[in-house]
Amino acid sequence: MGVDYRWAYPTFYTENTPFVLWANRYQDTVFRVVDSARLFARGYLGPNATVDGSVYVLNQTDPRSVGNSLAASDLCATYNDNSGGENATIWADIYLPPIVSRVNSLLNGLQFNSSDVVLFPYLCGFETQITGRRSPWCDTFTEREILQYEYAQDIRYWYGSGIGAQAQVDKYLMLPFLTDVVQVFVNGPNISYTSANSSTPFRPNPLIATFTNDGQINQLAAAIGVFDDQPALPATHIPSNRKFKASNFVPMRGTIGFERLNCGQRGLFMRIKLDDQVYPVSSCQQGPGRSCPLQQYQALIAKKSAAFGDFELACGIANTSIVPIGQDRTTFLTDLSLPWEYIVRP
């Protein structure tokens, strides 16, 4: 992935110069998000990555990081990912029993239930990634059954941690991060920032790379505006022309990308990509390539943020947080001196 991005934007990096990227700490003993950032840096920077690269790891459970991390939901008391809840159960009860019956009809002396069979595609994906070879588990589902399983994942993300979640706060949790990303784009690529606790100026790299988990990617997808016109996903059948497919942006190596397009006299525009495919903002796509004028996109996100209100109040932590209301916003992209982050080398 690092190599791909280096090739895609060849003028964005000058050899042997510093490069900063960010990663969610996730857990003390689970390093996969941080390691993803480290490996990306190695591919993007090349042999000098360990010298030129700095991965700023954000501790998302530090109370001082309210609204200022890559996993803001970890400090939000009102956030509840129910993995799709009742809708997921309804769909599972429809699509899984025929698969269980088919699989069990092929066996003698061994019987699986729905809880077993639903794990087969997981085994397919993870074993394929781990071994570098296509797992034989991938052949346990037919193509039709795989598409039914894909839709189960759509329901899981849509209703579990996305736009359709019962707790509406879920679709706003990455707005502080998104607001700061948009502001950096509005400021432009040649602006230097001074950290709160340091006089050393910092200029973000033209490629701003951040790494977090699938849940946070889904929360961000809910906020960016590309799915605002998607009707709620039914629990009883697969709609024929749905735009929301979780497999398009939260697979292994799932990405959401933002491109700042400078079109000279025509102005500045925002273009959004999910796993490298352009997804137009549903209410703003009059720019080149169905992009959105940058100022209009900033106004769209500001409107969403106003509906969200203060992060602490929405998350029910106003009386316990050490961050004053109004300061619960993202600043880590322009401030490298925050006490809840530390540096790891690629």
Image (spheres, rainbow, N blue to C red):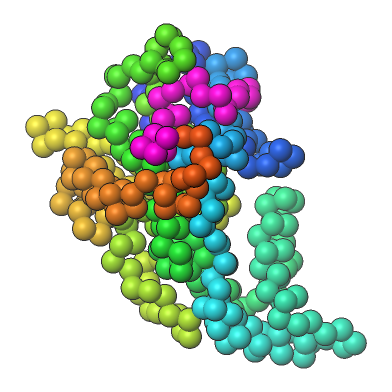
Outermost residue, left direction?
A: 265
Is 336 magenta? The answer is yes
The structure residue drawn at horizontal position 24% and vertical position 42%, both measured from the top left corner, is 298
Is residue 153 shown to the viewer in this render?
Answer: no
Dominant secondary-structure state across the stretch colored magenta: loop
The quadrant where residue 135 appears: bottom right
The correct choice, above or below, for 238 with respect to 47 in the image is below
Outermost residue, top direction?
A: 199
Outermost residue, front direction?
A: 319
Q: Which residue is nearer to you in this view: 218 or 50?
A: 218
The structure residue drawn at horizontal position 26% and vertical position 27%, both measured from the top left corner, is 187
Location of residue 206 in the rendering, given as x and y in whole percent from the top left corner: 37, 26
Is residue 268 shown to the viewer in this render?
Answer: yes
Q: Which residues are magenta?
A: 324-346
Location of residue 257 in the rendering, given as x and y in whole percent from the top left corner: 39, 43
The structure residue drawn at horizontal position 34% and vertical position 52%, both measured from the top left corner, is 308
The quadrant where residue 115 appears: bottom right
Q: Which residue is nearer to you in this view: 257 or 311?
A: 311
Location of residue 326 in the rendering, given as x and y in whole percent from the top left corner: 36, 37
Outermost residue, right direction?
A: 109
Location of residue 168 in the rendering, given as x and y in whole percent from the top left corner: 41, 62
Q: Which residue is nearer to you in this view: 277 or 213?
A: 213
The structure residue drawn at horizontal position 52% and vertical position 57%, both measured from the top left corner, is 79
Check the picture and name the quadrant holding the C terminus: top right
Is 96 magenta? The answer is no
